[in-house]
Amino acid sequence: MTYKIIGDDLPNIPWQDKPAGCNGVMWRHDANPIIDWNPIECAARVYNSAVVPFKGAYVGVFRSDYKNGRPHLHFGRSSDGLHWEFEPDAIAWVDKQGEPFQPSYAYDPRVVKIDDAYYITWCTDYHGATLGLGMTKDFQTFTRLENPCVPFNRNGVLFPRKVNGQFVLLNRPSDSGHTPFGDIFLSHSHDLEYWGKHRHVMGKGGQGWWQGTKVGAGPIPIETNAGWLMFYHGVSGTCNGLVYSIGAAILDIDEPWKVLYRTRDYLLTPERDYETRGFVPNVAFPCAALTDAQTGRIAVYYGAADTYSAVAYSQVDELVDYIRENSEVF
Ligand code: BMA
């Protein structure tokens, strides 16, 4: 392997080999969607969610849209990363004093382990949509920290380690609605409370109409010997609404606001019924990835049609090689 993941081994990562006849570098789990309509009594749809390995199995923070339409976060467990059981009630957040501190809505979570703690970012309400940030060590007590940004902002994604001694947060300034624009920025912090040294990472456009309206970071960036591998969503505006596809970029390891390579074409776009039909058709929205350093296997979790949860696979050596060979940076 020329290109390698720098990280832990995960021998029980969900995995299927690339099917015969597939000429892409990302392929879908053949039993998608892994989470169907109405998976919990209170929730109509569970999608755009985040999973991490935990004590030999998997846990996750799941976007659960209630039957009144409002999204909340639910904790879930799985032994294989594919079959999930969810807590019936939303995660009960507390503030640093241990007092209840529940967001009025919460969606599109990401989860990252940094040292001995798990940090959760999500889109929350503070006089408009902005990023929420919380921490847990045991997935039993969930403590909210200061919101990193003022409104409006979405798609907050922390790096899995400090870079040059600072925490790094990808984020996407937005508006109060469905945001017809959007570039990915990056901010630094010494303490996860005060954020600054803001840098522009990448914008929409180039030759690729699939990412011509806006872009937003997806799963936690994956450290490789070629740089940070960042999956992202690219959005196209059509007569029939927005279409969300999945692309990827390689960011400089020490200066991660510098894009070294970036997919000219999408890696995955809505094609299957569970991606093209649902509450919001034509959405593939990645929020998490599991990786196995030993084999270079990557399992990407993405929300499909704002209705389902789905998984797609890739192999780091082939993927990084493809991105480098088919790159357009602008
Ligand atoms: C974005 C977010 C996502 C959603 C997507 C498509 O603005 O709200 O949660 O998946 O739109 O509807």
Image (cartoon, rainbow, N blue to C red):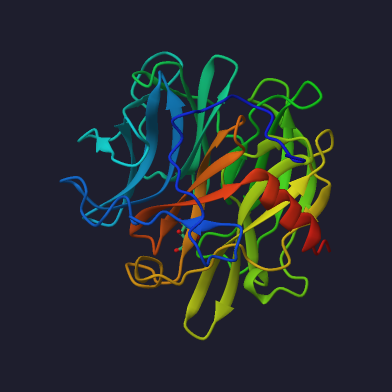
Residue at 35% over, 34% down:
80
Left or right: 34 as drawn, with respect to 289: left
- The spot of residue 87 in percent (x, y) is 24, 33
User: Residue 326 sits in which quadrant?
Assistant: bottom right
Residue 20 against residue 119 in the figure, above or below: below
Against 207, is 261 above or below? above
Percent position (x, y) of residue 26?
Answer: 56, 57
Residue at horizontal 43 percent and vertical 40 percent from the top = 14
Residue placed furthest toward the bottom: 239
Task: Please report the residue visible at 20 percent of the width from the left and 35 percent of the height from the top.
Answer: 88
Q: Residue furthest left?
A: 41
Q: Quadrant of the N terminus?
A: top right
Q: Nearer the viewer, residue 82 or 219?
A: 82
Residue 293's place in the image compared with 317, above or below, is above
Residue 151 showing in the rendered view: no
Please state the horizontal and vertical placement of residue 323, each as a whole percent of the image: 74, 56
Q: Is residue 274 left or right of residue 211?
A: left
Total marks placed: 0
Q: Report the residue at 73% width, 67% height from top.
A: 264
- The quadrant the C terminus occupies is bottom right
Q: Position of residue 162 (x, y in %)?
A: 72, 24
Q: Is residue 313 visible?
A: yes
In which quarter of the view is residue 91 placed?
Answer: top left
